Image (spheres, grey):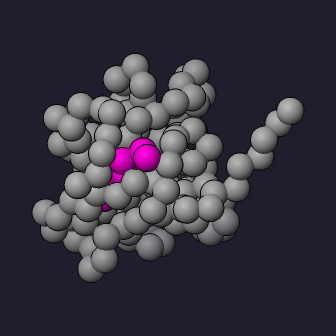
Amino acid sequence: MIKTTIDDCRFPELVQAAKEALQNSYSPYSNYKVGAALLTEQGKIFTGCNVENGSYGASNCAERTAVFKAVSEGQRRFTAIAIAAEDTETPPFPCGICRQVISEFCSQETPVLIYDGNGAVYNAELGELIPHAFDFKRE
C-alpha cells in the first residue's frame, strides 16, 4: 500500500468516475475504450476519455483529456488520478506522453489507480511509472 495525503475513501469514487468516463470514449479504430478521472487539491473531479482520429497522431488519450480539461478551468494541482478500461488482458497504464503530462502537475507520490475492467484495481505512485520525468525548471 502506498502512502498518500488524500483521503483514501475518495479512491472508489475516483475509479467509478473513470469507469463512467470511458463510456464516452470515441475509439472506432482501436475499439479500446479508456476513461480517466483526476482529483484536484480542492476535491473536485475532472474526467476525460480517449478521442481517436483517422490520423492517429491527432488522437488524444483519456488522461491528457482530463488534465487539459482541468487546466483549462484553472486547476494546476492534482492529488490522484484513476484510469479505467474495459476487459483488458493487461492493466491500462498510461502511455509515456501521458505520464510526462501528468508529472507536470503532480508529485512523484501522486497515487495512480488503474482499473482493468475485470475488477482489479492497481495502485502505484507516479514516480514508479515515470521515475525520471523531464522537469523544465524556469529561473
Q: In the rendered structure, which segment of residues is drawn in magenta?
A: 109-114
Q: Is residue 122 visible?
A: yes
Expressed as whole percent of the image width and height from the top left, the position of residue 138 reads 82, 36
Left or right of residue 78, residue 72 in this image: right
Toward the left, the furthest residue is 119
Expressed as whole percent of the image width and height from the top left, the position of residue 75 reads 54, 25
Image quadrant in which you'd find residue 81: top left
Taking the magenta stretch, the answer to whether it contains residue 78 is no
x 67%, y 66%: residue: 57
Vertical position of residue 65 compared to residue 74: above or below: below
Vertical position of residue 98 compared to residue 24: above or below: below
Q: Is residue 23 visible?
A: no
Q: Quadrant of the C terminus?
A: top right
Image quadrant in which you'd find residue 98: bottom right
Front-lying residue, 88 or 132: 132
Front-lying residue, 96 or 69: 96
